[in-house]
Image (tube, grey):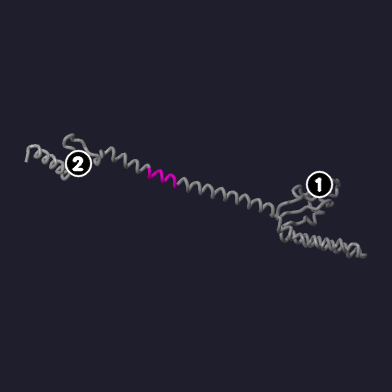
Amino acid sequence: MSKKEKNETEQKKKKTSGLQDGGVALDTETATPSATELSPQEVRIMELEAEVERLSSELLEEKEAFIRKVADMDNYRKRLVRDKENAVQYANERLLNDLIPILDDFDRAIGARDQSSDLQSYAEGVELIQKQLLDLLDRNWGLKRMDGIVGQEFSPHEHEAMMMEQGEQFETETVLAELQKGYYLHDRVLRTAKVKVGKP
């Protein structure tokens, strides 16, 4: 074997022994690391790039979930507005259903006006319809009339004085006459009664 061939064989052995010892291939002539060896900075950069990619995908998922939630909230708000509009529009439906039979009774009374010659019975029929209406409003809706106020002491919260009469016979301000009915809604005054007042 020639000297040249011997040198080449030794160099090949060194290269293969370098791979077996450290697992990193070194070029013995130039002594620089090959492409498979990475420095700690390069490893850290790769780790950070992987972390950035993971966080970007998480951010995209959270953004999509947020957009879905915003859309759901907007739909919910629109549904609430629509339900409120319907509630306002049809709020008096039950009251009107209660009043329709009373209107039917008034129609019958008006129809009977021309056929009835007995005015007294006709007036009693109208009074009966009025009583039926007041009972219904009291029972289902809490509307009560201020009845029997003549002779009571004047109350500015419940009565509105339209006329005054002074006299020595009055010890306190007293309701002498009822000019227009007053009404309560449950325990609150809905409309004051217009009255004539006797003043001492």
Query: Which range is magenta?
Result: 53-61
Q: For residue 98, which quarter of the picture?
A: bottom right
Q: Relative to 107, say whether 161 is above or below.
A: above
Residue type indicated by callout 1: Ala
Q: Nearer the viewer, residue 171 or 35?
A: 35
Which numbered disc, 2 or 1, marks the residue closer to the eye?
2
**Circle 2 SS class:** loop
In the image, is residue 56 part of the stretch drawn in magenta? Answer: yes
* Image location of residue 111, percent across then percent down: 87, 62
Residues at circles 2 and 1 in contact by the CB criterion of under 8 Å: no
Residue lying furthest right in this view?
117
Label 1: how many residues lie within 10 Å, few (<14), some (14-19) or many (20+)?
Answer: some
Residue lying furthest top in this view?
30
Kindly report the secondary structure that dominates the magenta region of the rendered protein.
helix
Which residue carries the number 1 mark? Answer: 161
Task: Please give the name of the residue rendered at 28% of the width and 37% of the height, measured from the top-left corner.
Answer: 41
Task: Please give the name of the residue rendered at 57% of the width and 50% of the height, measured from the top-left corner.
Answer: 75
Task: Please give the name of the residue rendered at 19% of the width and 41% of the height, measured from the top-left corner.
Answer: 25
Q: Please state if 88 lies on the left or on the right of 116 as rendered.
A: left
Q: Please state if 31 lies on the left or on the right of 179 as rendered.
A: left
**Circle 1 SS class:** strand
Q: Nearer the viewer, residue 162 or 80?
A: 80
Q: Relative to 116, say whether 146 is above or below.
A: above
Q: Nearer the viewer, residue 120 or 169?
A: 120
> Label 2 vs label 1: CA separation?
113 Å
Q: Is residue 2 visible?
A: yes
Residue type indicated by callout 2: Ala
Which residue carries the number 2 mark? Answer: 25
Q: Nearer the viewer, residue 118 or 183?
A: 118
